[in-house]
Structure formats: C-alpha cells, structure tokens
Image (cartoon, helix red, strand yellow):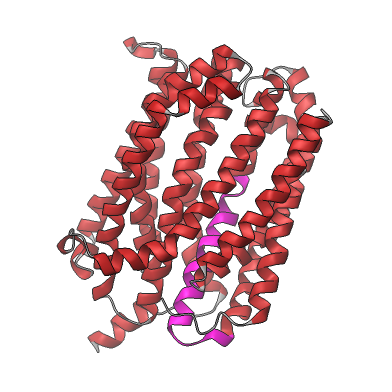
Amino acid sequence: MANKTHHSNLQLAITNKQILKIALPISFAVLVPQFNFITNNIFLGHYSQEALATASITGVYYLIFAMIGFGLNNGLQTMIARRAGENKPEEIGKLFGQSVFISFAIAIIGILLTWFLAPVILRNVLNSGSIANDSIEFLKIRIWGLPFLYVYQMRNALLVGTNNSRLLISGAIAETIANICFDYLFIFGNYGFPEMGLNGAAVASIIAEFTGMLVVFLVIHKKGIGRQFSLFNHFYWNKKLSHQLFSISMPIIFQLAFSVISWEFFYILIEHHGQQDLAISNVMRNVFGLTGCLTWAFAATSAAMVSNIIGQGQQDKVRILITKIVKLSTGAALIMAAFINLFPELIISVFGQSDIFINAAIPVVRVVSIAMVVMSFSVVWLNAVIGTGNSKTTLLIESVSILLYSVFVYLILEKYDLSITFGWMGEWIYWGSNFLLSFWYLSKGNWKDKKI
C-alpha cells in the first residue's frame, strides 16, 4: 500500500487539473522574482530616470547568469521528473547534490567575470560614461547574490520535478517582503539607512535572495522532503551523475545564456538611441516579464510533465499533453495582452515618468503584447523538447532563432536607425522561429526512444 501511494505521488496524469496543480504554484514562484525586479525598477524610476535606464543594462547582465542557473535547473528538473516517472526516488537526492556542487562552481566563475572582465566590456560598448560606471559599480555588488540564487533555483527543480510545486510559495513570499522593505530602506535612505540609490537595489536583492533560499530549505526540512529523497546524504562528487547532468544541462545553459546575451546586445543598441529609449525598453522588459510569468510556468510544467510521462512509457500522449498546456497558456496570454492594451497608461505610470515618456512607450506596448501571445505557445513547445531530454536540439533551435533576431535588431536599430518600436518586433521573429522549429522537431517523432 505504501509503495502504491508513493507511486501515485510521483507519476503524473495528463489532465488540466494536473497541469494547473503544477503550473499555478510555479507561476507564483516565477512572479515573485519578476515582482521583485519590477519593485526595484519602480523605486528607481521614482529616484531618477538615469537609474531606471541603467537598470536595463545591469538587469539583463545579471539575467544572463540567472538563466545559466535556470538552464541547470531545467536539466535537473528534467532528470528528476524522469526518475519520478520511473518511480526511483532514491536517485533524486543524488542528482540534487551534484547540482549544488555544479551551481557553486558556476557562481564563482560568474563573480570573477563580473569583477575583472565585465568592466572592460561595458566601458567599450556603452556610449554614456556615467551609465557604464554606474552599471559596473552596481554589478560588483549584485553578483554576490548569485550563489543564493542558484541554490534557490535547484530547490525549484527539486520541488517541481517531484510534484511539490505548491511549496514554492513560502520562499517566494519571504523573498518579496524582504525585497520591498530593503528597497525602500536602501534606495532612498529611509529610517536612518544610507541613501544608496541604484546600489541600494543591489543590496536589497541579495538580502531577498538569501531570505527566499533560507525559508524554502526550512520548509523542505519541516515537510520531510530532505529525508524522503535523502537530499543531504549525497554532497560528494559523483562523476557519472555529474556527467549525465552536464550532458542534459549544458546545451540548455548555452541556449538560455545565448538568448539573454542577445537581449543584452539589444539593450546596448538601444542605449545608442539615448537615455529615454533605454528607460522605455526597461519598462517594456518589466511588462513582458510580469505578464509572462504564467507563460513561463506553463513552459516549466511542459518540460516536467513531458519528461514524467515519457518515464512512464507514454510517449504517444506527449502531443495530447502539449496541446492541453498550449490552450491554457495562450488563453491566459490573450487575457493579459488585452488588459495591457486597454490600460497602457496605467501600467507605465507606476514607474514615475512624464506624460511624454508614457506617450512614447505606448506604441512599444502594442508590439510587446503581440510578442507575449506568440511566446505563450512557442515556449511550451520549446520546453517540451527539453522534456524529451534532447537538449542539444533545443540549443540548435535557439541558436537559429537568436541569429535571426540579432541580425534583425542590428539592421533596424543600428544600420537604419529606426524607432525602438520596430526594434521590439524582433521578439516576433525570435518566438515565431522557436515555435516553428520545435513543432517540426516534435512532429518527426524520432525523440521517443531517447534515454536519460
């Protein structure tokens, strides 16, 4: 009887109820970091437009390393979900231990690059010396949050892969409260704290990431998940498991890193158009990120559930599962796109900018809302490819899409010097390409015998 119960906890059913049970807690957990990022930018927007503009460069830079961790997270989640589908809980703790080792090594590399290489690059590619100097100073503080973020992400993979995504909420709430409080204290210097401006947002974010990580591990301990999967019995190097995790994760890591690097390239091109255009684009990234939280949750659900049902030997049900997730994801995106098109002034006004700024940003909102809808089904199909274990294919798909995107934005923004509204149309090309290539690959069916 005990074995039967454990079996049902790990193997998933292909139903809307099961999809939402996984996706909604994930969406909340994804929403919180986005909300924290938006909170930073709202405070910075009220502090100064230059701080808001600078935050676009620094935010995307840090996102590069966050996505590297997210790539490791996706690889770990895929393997954990596969072991859950195979009903092998004893292997899950071993995978988690290796992921922590690897994530700390990547964090050290990220810190060293930020301190010694990033300043050279930023001073050479940015036109504004003040934005370059402010960005460098901010990043040298902000990057110290990376180890906390990575462990936090590995915890996400564990909980989603083992069908415990509801437990993501506690850490997310703690992180949000900490971020808002310390933003208020450190950016403006309230209640006797030093006025740190942009750098205050960096300090607040580090404290928030540490808080979220700590709370989640307390919850894992209290719920007995550490004992269930022997999480803390496997903190030693395992060459075989690390190789397996690397083989799945590295293509995803490169895929996500290249994707965000192309976005940093986009923002560098935007910076050449001036401070206001850079600040507008930062606001658009906030809108895109906030409204895309549910979409990314459905994407993570797609990867986890596809891997789980393949582990159950139900490869023929993958297309049915993807279709169900796409309907939910796209339906939610259409509702959100309609809302931001109906009330764009309301959304943009919270960043504390002038009417001139708001009027200049509204056309970009229209473009971004279409990109949101295209992303809503594209990212589900792309993550379904990740769920099959064919991460090298996702890297190839992303590489093609990124190349098309980068060429487009360079021609539009640099060569022909057109409006940033046209530059943001590059998102249509990027997500459209991802969808077409993912759909074509999964339709072929030669992924069904992939073993991980």
* Residue nearest the observer in this picture, 173 or 428: 428
Height in image: 204 above or below 372? above
Would residue 183 be found to the left or right of residue 90 on screen?
right
Would residue 63 be found to the left or right of residue 273 on screen?
left
Residue that sits furthest to the left in the current view: 233
Height in image: 177 above or below 403? above
**Among the 4 quarters of the image, the one containing residue 154:** bottom left
The x, y position of residue 83, in whole percent, is 35, 76
Would residue 126 be found to the left or right of residue 134 on screen?
right
Residue drawn at (23%, 75%) of the image: 90
Question: The N terminus lies in which quarter of the figure?
Answer: bottom left
Question: The C terminus lies in which quarter of the figure?
Answer: bottom left
* Residue nearest the observer in this picture, 160 or 445: 445
* SS assignment for the magenta stretch, majority: helix
**Among the 4 quarters of the image, the one containing residue 426:** top right
Q: Give the range drawn in magenta.
A: 290-316
* Residue nearest the observer in this picture, 348 or 389: 389
**Magenta segment: does it hold 288?**
no
Q: Total number of numbered labels? A: 0
The x, y position of residue 122, in whole percent, is 53, 24
**Magenta segment: does it hold 314?**
yes
Q: Can residue 89 be seen in this view?
A: yes
Residue drawn at (75%, 50%) of the image: 428
The x, y position of residue 262, in whole percent, is 62, 42
* Residue nearest the observer in this picture, 363 or 94: 94
Would residue 117 be found to the left or right of residue 225 on screen?
right
Q: Can residue 159 be seen in this view?
A: no
Residue drawn at (47%, 87%) of the image: 313
Residue drawn at (54%, 15%) of the image: 47
